[in-house]
Amino acid sequence: MAETLGDPYRQLSDKSLFSWKIERWLIHGVLLFAIVMTGLTLYLYLAEIPSWKEVAFGISGYDIQTWYGFFIGSI
C-alpha cells in the first residue's frame, strides 16, 4: 500500500461502532453524489446542446457542472 500523510495517525482513530456508521454514511453519500452528478453531466454532454442552455430536472447544465466541479474538487 502507498504511504499517505495520515498513516502515522491511523492507529489513533476512533474504532467505535458509531464512528464506523458515520464513515459509512459519508462514504455512501459522496459515492451517490458522484454517480448522480456524473450521470447528469454525461446526459448533458450526450444531448449535444450547449450546457448553459440545457436543463435537466429543472437545473441548468452550467449549474450542475459548477457544483459537480466544486464538490468533487473539494474532496
Image (tube, rainbow, N blue to C red):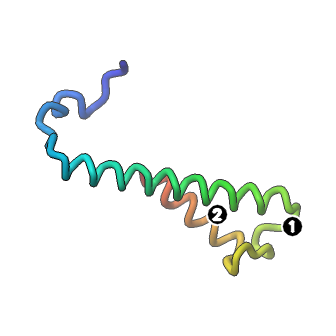
Quarter of the image for residue 67 reads bottom right
Q: Which residue is mark 2?
A: 65
Q: How many marks?
A: 2
Residue at the image point whose x is 69% and y is 61% from the top: 40
Residue type, numbered disc 2: Gln
Side of 68 relative to 57 (left or right): left
Q: Residues within 10 Å of mark 1 (few under 14, many from 20)?
A: few
- Crowding near the residue tagged with mark 2, few <14, some 14–19, many ≥20 C-alpha atoms within 10 Å: some
x and y percentages locating residue 56 in the rendered image: 73, 73
Q: Quadrant of residue 57?
A: bottom right
Vertical comparison of 30 with 4: above or below: below
Identified by mark 1, the residue type is Ile
Check if mark 2's residue and mark 1's residue have beta carbons within 8 Å: no
Which residue matches tag 1? Answer: 49
Q: Residue at x 49, y 50 (%)?
A: 31
| Quadrant showing the N terminus | top left
Marks 2 and 1 sit apart, C-alpha to C-alpha, by 14 Å
**Coordinates of residue 2 in the picture (x, y in percent):** 36, 21
